[in-house]
Amino acid sequence: MLQVKNLNITLAGATRDISIVKDVSFELDAGRSLGVVGESGSGKSMTALAVMGLLPGAIRASGSINLAGQELLSLSEQEMCSVRGNKVAMIFQEPMTSLNPVQTIGRQVAEPLTLHKGMTRAAARQEAIRLLDRVGIPDAARRLDVYPHQLSGGQRQRVMIAIALSCSPKVLVADEPTTALDVTVQRQILDLLRELVSETRMALIIISHDLGVIGEMVDEMLVMYGGNVVERGQADKIFSQPAHPYTSRLLEAIPRFGMSRSERLKTIPGTMPEIGSEMKSCIFAGRCDLVCAECLQAPPPFVSVDDAHVAACIKAGRVMETAQ
Amino acid sequence: MSTFLKNARMHRSLMIGGVLTLLLLSVAVLSLFWTPWSPTAIDIANKLKGPSAKHWLGTDHLGRDVLSMLMSGSQISIIVGFLAVSVGLLVGVALGALASTYRGWVEELIMRMSDFSIAFPIIITAVLLTAILGPGTVNSILAIGIFNIPIFARITRGAANAAWAREYVMAAQTCGKGRLRITIEHVLPNISGALIVQATILFAVAILAEAALSFLGLGTQPPEPSWGKMLNNAQTFVGLAPHLAIFPGLAIALSVLGLNLIGDGLRDVLDPKLARAR
């Protein structure tokens, strides 16, 4: 239903264009969820903003983002406004600041309904109560007239989800939806999102740098590094047998319960290449153990290692073998 | 709202400013119905008298009662201040909001125009405008109001641009709202604090400017009493009857002080980040 093909995101610079995201492609069906992982600056949020048509200022997207037959990148700003919130919705990392502090939450939840569905205020209010109730706000009817500062972080994120769900979008983009929340609340929010996906048949794109968050709740996974997709496939397969050295190292870096205290957490040495640097080699070559002469000559092509599981590494097979 | 009132009561300069401004307003309202003497009644026999039981603040060179003139002069100050700020607020906020809504060349155009007009000092602008339009109360309101426009435009644009970078504005965009609608519904209510503070301070500036224009003979025309006019007349007799300069001067100073204190106080109370630890 959502098809992203060869999405390139570039920042128009003074002397040359700086490439932020290169050739991202993925497909997502209704009722499925996709996890996008990568470290800060890997381009995951930019990809999400491109789907929303909300890339800031001088940043441009090219390629194709097709939502149920509609090409989003070719829409005008005005046309995009009728898509946003209606067919694609988004929730953010910071529930504390993502709600307007001077409006009641009832008004903020009802707003997209009057805007996109042409509901009357009274009808939208009724629907807002139903939505708040659905996302687990207790005593929703009375909470309608409450201001955001009167709610806790977890409740605010629930309100954000209610707003995003209000027009039954086809795609929900969640950009690090639980990063600002504590662990127990994090779990509740993820459970809520999972329930909503199976209930409403919407597609969910969830962005995180936390593999723990993503691993247990998504069907498919996209691993990004330095603006490139390095591995793509079904989440459980990637978890059990990563095919790209970066994914493999990321998985090793997850702290495990029961680790001995003396054991140091594994890290990936080095840093990501600077954004916009022209790479004539594999972008991960500088930090990879398996690097060889061939890796430095040209960026590696996608190697298909399994059904719908690809990795941008010429040694993908070997990486899979060494993975436990 | 209740915390706002509580904070306001705790704030000393806001309280003092509030009392001074309330005093100014009540004197103006009172003067609509009652003044000790008629502010225009001439009594040459009793000219240039100092304060006495009959004339509390003395009389001027035509024997008019200074207290009565001060009282009805406050009306002009308030009207000019209020209307001049309203002109500046309405047009300036609209321009500033447009600039931050559409950015790009719209913003450039509006901001360069306001840079251009801000480069002229207020009194020069006002003198220039009243010279073209002719002296009088209405024209001095216009002159001062026009001066206020770029100030409000700048402040609105700055605060609005900051608000546009906030997450809730981004969230509103993801709901599919247009930029103009977001500005009206989300940005302006969130920057109203800064605008209120600025309006209070510019109210004081406008009172001062009106007095200055009247002093120069470009503002309110006789026989209508105005504080600036009274100061102008007092010049000649300042050695003979200093009270003629002191009382209008005091009235202007206290009004301006009161409004400035309110402005400062409101800034503290409306901005929780600046709230002092209690």
Image (spheres, coloured by chain):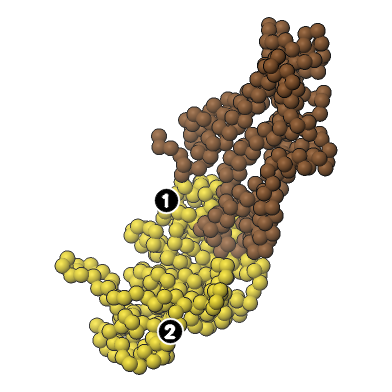
Chain colours: A yellow, B brown
Residue placed most toward the observer, A28 or A53: A53
Examine the rendered structure and indicate whether residue A87 appears above or below residue A289.
above
Q: Is residue B59 left or right of residue B133?
A: left
User: Mark 1, residues whose alpha carbon is within 10 Å: few (<14), some, or many (≥20)?
Assistant: few
Q: Secondary structure at mark 2?
A: loop
Q: Secondary structure at mark 1?
A: loop
Q: Quadrant of the C terminus of chain A?
A: bottom left
In the picture, the disc for residue A279 is 2
Q: Chain of mark 2?
A: A
Residue in the image at 45% along x and 49% along y: A151
Residue in the image at 60% along x and 63% along y: B176
Q: Is residue B27 left or right of residue B169?
A: right
The amino acid type of the residue labelled 2 equals Met
- Please name the residue that numbered disc 1 is placed on: A152
Q: Quadrant of the N terminus of chain A?
A: bottom right
The amino acid type of the residue labelled 1 equals Ser
